[in-house]
């Protein structure tokens, strides 16, 4: 399987497809963030319909958006409810090439015999540096020769991310940045190929955020940042 070159900039976000994501409006920050992720990953798939493993897939929105470009897609996540929602969405859309299950990169079960290695492995960086190192290690064990690992995460040093989280009354973030992700990858024998900035989805602000009406009002008035999430493309070193 030959993957598309990863040094190219991501193409323009594609038109939104029905059933992908949780909102249909092009003005929805979540829809824009999802479309940007799918567009970038589609540019890495190339014409060969690769196999893809998504570690930390959540409700499967990325895989659902990529389904037409994949030969096989498997999403694994620790949350049973998220996996059930992903399965239901794939069944409703008739996407038999997608499979969702509870598990990790190295321990999961699906109805058919899964491949031992995948052309693309996505790692959703949601567990801080320790979780990222663990998931990258598992992803490396599942990576086919010549394949790519893509880390999808939020840059905790981005000013818009820091400010919004302050408005939410959240504790200081664990400090995940593209540089930290690159260093963790190098320690495992991976080398960066490309680093892309992606739109950030800030999420809703809870009514009790910081106990301050002023904070809530400030966060609601803030424009959605153009960047804040990142995609780090990796390959085996050497």
Image: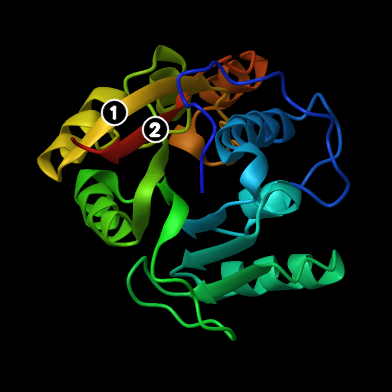
Frontmost residue, 134 versus 26:
134
Image location (x, y in percent) of residue 216: 58, 26
Q: Which residue: 15% across, 42% down?
A: 189
How busy is the neighbourhood of tag 1: few (under 14 within 10 Å), some, or many (20 plus)?
some
- Which dot marks residue 192? 1
**Does 12 sit left or right of 208 as displayed?**
right
Q: Eyeballing the image, is 88 above or below 65?
A: below
Marks 1 & 2, CB-CB < 8 Å contact = yes
Image location (x, y in percent) of residue 206: 57, 41
* Alpha carbons under labels 1 and 2: distance apart: 6 Å
Q: Eyeballing the image, is 36 above or below 221?
A: below
SS category of the residue bearing label 1: strand
Q: In the rendered structure, which disc, 1 or 2, sits on the residue that comes first in sequence?
A: 1
Q: Which residue: 46% across, 16% down?
A: 160
Q: Which residue: 48% across, 19% down?
A: 197
**Does 18 sit left or right of 148 as displayed?**
right
**Does 125 sit left or right of 16 as displayed?**
left
Frontmost residue, 56 versus 173:
56
Q: Which residue: 22% across, 43% down?
A: 129
Could one spot residue 57 in this view of the protein? Answer: no
Per the image, the residue denoted by label 2 is 233
Image location (x, y in percent) of residue 166: 40, 25
Could one spot residue 19 in this view of the protein? Answer: yes
Give the farthest residue toward the bottom.
111
């Amino acid at each position: 399987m030959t993957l598309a070159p990863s040094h190219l900039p991501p193409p323009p976000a594609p038109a939104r497809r029905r059933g992908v994501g949780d909102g249909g409006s092009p003005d929805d920050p979540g829809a824009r963030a999802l479309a940007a992720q799918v567009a970038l990953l589609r540019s890495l798939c190339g014409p060969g319909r690769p196999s893809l493993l998504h570690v930390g897939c959540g409700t499967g929105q990325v895989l659902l958006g990529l389904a037409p470009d994949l030969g096989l897609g498997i999403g694994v996540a620790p949350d049973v409810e998220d996996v059930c929602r992903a399965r239901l969405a794939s069944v409703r859309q008739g996407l038999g090439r997608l499979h969702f299950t509870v598990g990790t990169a190295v321990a999961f079960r699906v109805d058919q015999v899964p491949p031992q290695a995948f052309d693309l492995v996505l790692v959703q960086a949601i567990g801080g540096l320790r979780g990222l190192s663990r998931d990258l290690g598992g992803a490396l064990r599942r990576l086919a020769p010549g394949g790519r690992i893509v880390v999808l995460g939020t840059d905790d040093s981005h000013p818009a991310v820091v400010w919004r989280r302050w408005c939410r009354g959240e504790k200081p973030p664990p400090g995940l940045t593209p540089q930290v992700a690159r260093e963790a990858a190098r320690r495992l024998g991976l080398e960066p190929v490309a680093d892309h900035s992606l739109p950030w989805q800030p999420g809703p602000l809870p009514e009790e955020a910081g106990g301050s009406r002023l904070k809530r009002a400030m966060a609601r008035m803030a424009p959605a940042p153009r960047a804040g999430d990142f995609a780090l493309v990796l390959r085996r070193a050497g």
